[in-house]
Every structure is written in structure tokens, then in C-alpha cells.
Amino acid sequence: MTDSIAELGYIEVGVTSLDDWQQYADNVLGVSSEAHEGVLNLSYDRTIWRIQAKPTGEDDITCLGFRLTSEEALQSVCHRLSAQGINISDGSEEECAARQVEQLKICLDPDGLRVELYIGERLGTSAFKSPIGVGGFVTEGQGLGHVVLCASDLEAAKQFYLDGLGFLLSDHIVVGPPDQQLELTFLHCNPRHHTLALLPIPLPKRLNHIMLQVADMDDVGYGLDRAKTAGIKISSGLGKHPNDEMFSFYMATPSGFDIEYGWGGLEIDDSIWQPKTFNQTSIWGHQPESTT
Ligand SMILES: [Fe+2]
């Protein structure tokens, strides 16, 4: 879609300990971290930063930043959101400068999560170089990865993200016994199979996990070794999802929510894509694992 978002360009997370996050970023994730004016910026491609950790203590996601490619697209999305009754404000000069964006609009999703819509490439001056030799992360044309959010009102969330922002349905996964079925909804805005997934569970925290996709399959294995060496909780061992075909494992962050560290995610061609419904979250693996 030309009048929808192009990518999830950045996210902010509120954390308890910036020091713990810096250690985790440098030694486990293998991304670059830079402490700057009281926040910690994580980068893993040419973009200035993709994840910003702030010491605000929620240990949850606090902002989604979506990039649009033109003023027309930004206006179109804002118009659709306004028609839904969503209040939209302009980002201040200071906010634009902090994110290094050209234009910024701010609103809240139906669960009160801050959503920022921006124009600007936010490119840094040098290529990414992992501090521990990770070969690179898949972000070109696909954004920072994906996030899985809990939605207390699934229909309201769908209206906001599909009808408002212009996400397209990728597919569903339905799990659980017949009388307690849980439908997971996967949404895309570019070739990445899903940039956003919605869990219809009103949990205390919005964020279930963030997915970072490495370019080399071996880097999933190296990442798992590093996590175990560092004593990080492996929430789900190696496995593969049926819908995005991601080969991955899940590990806890210092904030409790997970990071999925994956490789080989499916890319969608909208000219032929047909949403399906799956009945399992993994075709193999992704079992709980102990480090002891
Ligand atoms: Fe995921």
C-alpha cells in the first residue's frame, strides 16, 4: 500500500536497569549500544538506533515508531485515524530532533500505547559492526523486526492497525481447547511476514516479545550459546513457526519480556498472498528450556 506505513522503524522500552540492558545488548544480542543523555540506544543496521531503552521502570514497551515514505502517506493515515476518533498531535521540534526525523505525528493505540508516525530515514554515518561478530541483521525494507503485543480489545486493535494504519492481514494461528480458543492475528506492512502480532489477552504488560532476525543461520546458534553462557533464561528452545517459518529461540530480556532471535523468516508477496489459519504456533521445537 502506498498510503500505509513502510516499516516499524524504532521502538522505545521503559526498563529498570540501563546497565543490565547494555550488558545484554553487547554480550548476548551482539548489537551496538550507546548510552546517551540518560537513555541507551541500540542499533543493528545503518539506522541511528532501532531500540531505545529509557530508565522509566515499566519493563514494557512504551512507544512504537512507524516510518512513512511521504507527506501524502502520513496525511492519509492521519486522516483515517482521525475518522476513527483518534486524537493526533504534532511532535515538537525537540521530539523530532531527538529521533532525527523530519516530521512526527503522535497518537495512542486503543490500549494507550504511544504510536509515533514519522518521515525520515534516520541513517547514521557508518555501517553496523557487531561488537561480538554477529554477521548482520535483516532490516532492509523490512524494519527492525517484529513485536507481539497483548490487545485487551482485539476488534479495537484491528480497527486501529488494519483500517487506520493500513496493515494487511498475514494469517491467524488458533490454539487452545474448543471452548477456550485463542486467535493470534499476524499483520504486515512490507515483505516481512509480520511486523506486528496481536494476542487477545489482557496481560499487565503490552509487550510479549521483540523479534530480531539475523542474516546467517549460524548466528542463531551462536546467540543461543551466548545466552546460555550468560545465564539468560531460555524461554523457548530452538524451533520453527508454521506461518513465518522463522527458525528461532526465545530468551528473557533484563525486563522480563522476551526477545526472539531468529533466521529465515518468510517474505510476503502481496500479489499472490492468501491468508490462512494455522492450528499450532510451532511445527517443531520452541519448548521451554532450562539453563541448569
Ligand atoms: Fe515472534
Image: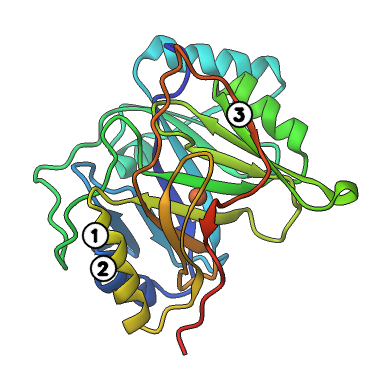
Q: Secondary structure at mark 1?
A: helix
Tell me, yes or no, if residue 25 can be seen here.
no
- Near mark 2 (Cα within 10 A), the count class, few <14, some 14-19 or many ≥20, is some
Image point 52% across, 62% down: which residue? 286
Q: Disc 1 designates what residue? A: 218
Give the residue pinned by disc 2.
Answer: 222
Q: Residue furthest right?
A: 179
Q: Quadrant of residue 274?
A: top right
Q: Amino acid at mark 3?
A: Tyr
Q: Is residue 190 above or below residue 62?
A: above
Q: Are marks 3 and 1 in contact (CB under 8 Å)?
A: no
Compute the Cα span from label 1 to label 2.
6 Å
Q: Amino acid at mark 1?
A: Asp
Sequence-earlier tag: 3 or 2: 3
Q: Residue at x 56, y 48 (%)?
A: 148
SS label for mark 2: helix
Residue 154 % position (x, y): 74, 37
Q: Nearer the viewer, residue 62 or 100?
A: 62
Q: Do the CB atoms of the residues marked 1 and 2 lie less than 8 Å apart?
A: yes
